[in-house]
Image (spheres, rainbow, N blue to C red):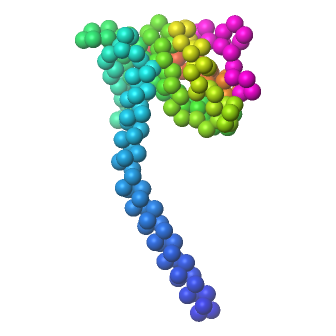
Amino acid sequence: MNTILKFAFILFLVNLAAASILATTYNITKPKIEEQIRMAQAEALKQVMPEEVADRIEPVEKDGVVQYWKAFKGKSSQLNGYVFIVKKYGYSSVIETMVGIKKDGTVIGLRVISQNETPGLGVKVADISFIKQFINRNVSELELSKNNINAVAGATISSRAFLDSVKSSSMEMLKNKNE
């Protein structure tokens, strides 16, 4: 009985030390990770909302959390477009995408922020060859078909999830902002 208590105590100490090391590492790296996320988001904002469309992007927050961004050109108060993040489950993971649209619904930029789709297949939704099919098209016209948006071969579920998230969220954004 004494031996069991001794081993249990040693196991407890080892786990306590491991948990303490993990907590310390997390607290040290958390600000660096958050800064990397902010930098990646700033880069994505520039990519999905080119300067020729808008050079000033202002966040719209609710309860301290950015909901979307409004895009303006110069000092003008005239709205040129929106940037927002959409998420939808694909074949094997959530596909998180930043979308830039003009106020008339024309897609001007897309960037996949995160996804863990099947390597070699679903991951191709992040490829420029797939994404460029959406650029300069109105969101109301986006469909998977031979004459519109071609799905990634072997990754129809991921392609459809990507398209549906972009289309439905864009339509909702335009509808809510025009009311």
Q: Residue at x 41, y 31 (%)?
A: 41
The x and y percentages for residue 39 are 38, 35
**Residue 130 versus residue 21 in the image, above or below:** above
- The residue sitting at the left extreme is 75
- The residue sitting at the right extreme is 154
Q: Is residue 94 magenta?
A: no
Image quadrant holding the N terminus, namely: bottom right
Q: Residue at x 63, y 32 (%)?
A: 123
Q: Residue at x 33, y 22 (%)?
A: 58
Q: Which residue occupies the foreground of this view, 47 or 80?
A: 47
Compared across the picture, whether 78 is left or right of 122 comes to: left
Q: Is residue 143 magenta?
A: yes
**Residue 96 versus residue 167 in the image, above or below:** below
The x and y percentages for residue 151 are 69, 19
Q: Quadrant of residue 20?
A: bottom left
Looking at the magenta stretch, what is its main secondary structure? loop
The x and y percentages for residue 69 are 39, 22
Q: Which residue occupies the foreground of this view, 88 or 43?
A: 43
Is residue 173 shown to the viewer in this render? no
The x and y percentages for residue 79 are 35, 11
User: Over which residues does the magenta segment extend?
Assistant: 140-155
Compared across the picture, whether 96 is left or right of 83 comes to: right
Is residue 84 shown to the viewer in this render? yes
Q: Residue at x 41, y 45 (%)?
A: 33
Compared across the picture, whether 111 is left or right of 123 comes to: left
